[in-house]
Image (cartoon, grey):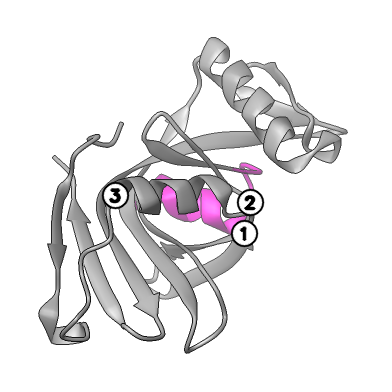
Amino acid sequence: MADKNPQTRLDARYSAAEATATDWSEAEARLTGAELFWISTVRPDGRPHVTPLPAVWAEGALHFCTGPEERKARNVADNPHVVLTTGTSTWNKGYDLVVEGEAVRVTDEDRLRELAAAWEAKYGSFWHFEVRDGAFHHGGGHAFVFSVAPGTVFGFGKGEPFSQTRWRFT
């Protein structure tokens, strides 16, 4: 679970002179509202793997789900260090976030039921999951759920003033 008051720093090297650090509460609201994230994992041979997915911010962490045989699940089994990004595909407006952390599998069924409800509340009934055997079940398949508490988050304000804020968590 992430700190409520992480260490916050504006990086003046990559920020306009008039820029100020973004408050963590604003970044957290953006993580909560974002619909699409890109996850970066590392293959066993060291090559990167990046793919889009939905995610839910809850109790100070991002949560994603994936089938146990999917590449990202296999990568996380070997190396839990991941990066999740979200933002806009524009240069001169918007805000991008980069969340670095370790993916930890969630198997507690009470917690999984809470997360399943959060997924459906955020994304609609298509994302309805049953919970059993420490996983989400949907249709004929099942998915493992992972929690990524941030170690470091970077925020990039685009447009005047451009800014780069870093939050570090303990």
Residue bearing mark 2: 54
Q: Is residue 148 above or below residue 81?
A: above
Which residue is found at the position 15% from the left and 85% from the top?
17
How far is the residue under mark 1 from the one under mark 3?
A: 20 Å
Mark 1, mark 3: which one is toward the viewer?
3
Q: Is residue 134 visible?
A: no
- Total number of numbered discs in the rendering: 3
Q: Give x and y (percent) for residue 97.
A: 40, 64
Q: Quadrant of residue 169?
A: top left
- Dot 2, how many residues are within 10 Å of its Cα: few (below 14), some (14-19), or many (20+)? some
Q: Residue flagged by tag 2: what amino acid is it?
A: Pro
In which quadrant will I find the N terminus? top left
Q: Is residue 71 magenta?
A: yes
How far is the residue under mark 3 from the one under mark 2?
A: 21 Å
Outermost residue on the front side: it is: 18
Q: Is residue 54 above or below residue 126?
A: below
Name the secondary structure under disc 2: loop
Q: Is residue 40 above or below residue 108?
A: below
Task: Give the magenta-colored segment's residue range.
Answer: 65-79
Residue bearing mark 1: 36
Mark 3, mark 2: which one is toward the viewer?
3
Q: Give x and y (percent) for residue 96.
A: 43, 70
Residue bearing mark 3: 24
